[in-house]
Amino acid sequence: MKKPEILVTPSKVEDISRLIKAGATAFIIGEEKFALRLAGEFSREDIKEAVKIAHNANAKIYVAMNALFHNDKLELLPDYISFLAEVGVDAIVFGDPAIIMAAREVAPEMALHWNTETTATNYFTANYWGQKGAKRAVMAREINMDAIVETKENAEVEIEVQVHGMTCMFQSKRTLIGNYMEFQGKDLKVEGRSKDRSLILHDPEREAKYPVFEDENGTHIMSPNDICIIDELEDMLEAGVDSFKIDGILKSVDYLEKVTALYDEAIELYLQDPDAYQDKKYYFLQEVEKIQPANRKLDTGFFFKETVY
């Protein structure tokens, strides 16, 4: 039984070494211009430095280019992909076929990971994109554990699954909040458009708070709870899922470091002694709960039920 990759989303270059020591073996970074819902903004110099740090520790760097591209950005893709190939990025995460077309021209050897957030729901689709050039398919967050295992059993590509962190519930290419603020005559410089401005949608009936932020790609509404299945890893480990993703958006590096270390310990324990993992898995969950922000409850997402938000 192989150990899956532990894939983490850092917010800055300085986080990478700490997260590697905690057990991370791969990272997703990138520029907002090309990517959706990054934990942090990484310039070209940042990406170059991140690759150097990661490769020195036998870790990998993936760069997200999974935004929804309009015609005006197409001419930017070849140069950016060429740069990523030149600095030795390990893969590009994409959703738009435009990335495949551009990569074929300027970096045909570049590994590609298909991620459209919601449409990777079966192994036929995963294998279709594999035939188009993708090395990996990132599974949708809305499917259950049985579907994930069945997909891995029949997939001809690597399979990545998010096991921890918040997920996106809604995205619009329009800046809905910004437009509303402008209509109200409010100062957008004061309100801000960054991920850390602490805007939420509050549902008092369910006592749920949904983080909201806007960036170059529009408006994003995030889940009120964080996925956490550190105590339910057995089926995916047995199936051989290739990559477990810990999403660090809107989280501190201290939090991410502790969560990464706990998942690494849990995975190692299961691979060495499944019975010992069974005995200790609730301890892992309790340890995550200790560091969980008070306003962010933990749940199992759609892994075992239809989550209702």
Image (cartoon, helix red, strand yellow):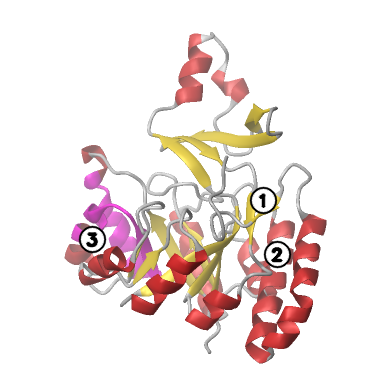
Q: What element carries label 1?
A: loop
The mark found on residue 100 in the picture is 3
Q: What residue type is labelled 2?
A: Val
Residues shaded magenta: 74-101
Percent x, y for residue 111?
Answer: 32, 71
Q: What SS does tag 2 mark? A: helix
153 lies above or below 179? below
Query: 60 and 170: which one is in front?
Result: 170
Is 78 situated left or right of 118 in this image? left
Question: What's the mark number on residue 32?
Answer: none
Dots 2, 1 in contact, CB < 8 A? no
Q: Is residue 94 left or right of residue 129?
A: right
Q: Which of the 4 image quarters holds residue 165?
A: bottom right
Label 2 vs label 1: CA separation?
A: 11 Å
Asked if one can make out residue 107 in the rendered structure from this viewpoint, the answer is no
Q: Which residue is drawn at 53% across and 89% down?
A: 1
The circle on residue 259 is: 2
Q: Which of marks 2 and 1 is in front?
A: 2
Instruction: Considering the whole magenta stretch, tell me its main secondary structure.
Output: helix
> What residue do we see at 66% from left, 84% from top?
270
Task: Give the Cα distance between marks 2 and 3.
Answer: 34 Å
CA gap between label 1 and label 3 equals 31 Å
Residue linked to disc 1: 251
Disc 1 residue type (three-letter): Lys
Residue closest to the eye, 142 or 66: 142
For disc 2, the neighbor class at 10 Å (few under 14, some 14 to 19, many from 20) is: many
How many neighbours does mark 1 have within 10 angstroms: few (below 14), some (14-19), or many (20 or more)? some
